[in-house]
Amino acid sequence: MRLLNIDTLLASTASLLSMALQACLELSHGFKLHYKQPAEQKKIALELIMS
């Protein structure tokens, strides 16, 4: 029986972590990230994490 390969596991884990982080940031900052472009989301997320 073959288990999931490591690449698939890492990719899905990274995807889940990314979605969870975005959800937490949206909840804690009034959903303002939801309406921004992806590049703007990353910039805001980094600013929030660094502050």
Image (cartoon, helix red, strand yellow):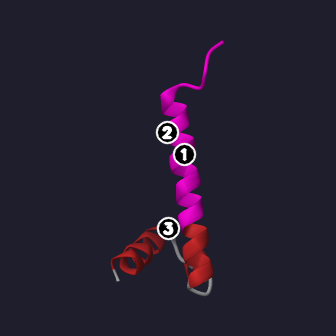
Taking 32 as reference, is 23 above or below it?
Answer: above
Query: Looking at the picture, which amino acid does disc 3 mark?
Result: Pro
Question: Looking at the image, is mark 2 or mark 3 nearer the viewer?
Answer: 2
Q: Which residue is drawn at the image coordinates 48% and 31% (left, top)?
A: 7
Instruction: Classify the position of the N terminus by image quarter.
Output: top right
The reply, left or right, for residue 4 in relation to residue 40 is right
Magenta stretch bounds: 1-21
Q: Quadrant of residue 9?
A: top right
Marked residue nearer the N-terminal end (1 or 3): 1
Q: Check if mark 2's residue and mark 1's residue have beta carbons within 8 Å.
A: yes
Give the residue type at disc 2: Leu
**Label placed on residue 41:** none
Q: Position of residue 23 (x, y in %)?
A: 61, 69
* Label 2 crowd bin: few (<14), some (14–19), many (20+), radius 10 Å: few
Q: Which residue is mark 1?
A: 13
Q: Main secondary structure of the magenta part?
A: helix
Cα–Cα gap, marks 2 and 1: 5 Å
Q: Amino acid at mark 1?
A: Thr
Give the numbered dot on residue 10. 2
Residue 31, position as x, y percentages in the image: 62, 82
Numbered disc 1: secondary structure:
helix
Number of callouts: 3
Position of residue 47 measured from the top left corner of the image (x, y, whole percent) = 37, 79
Residue at mark 3: 38
Query: Does residue 5 lie above or below 46 as drawn?
Result: above
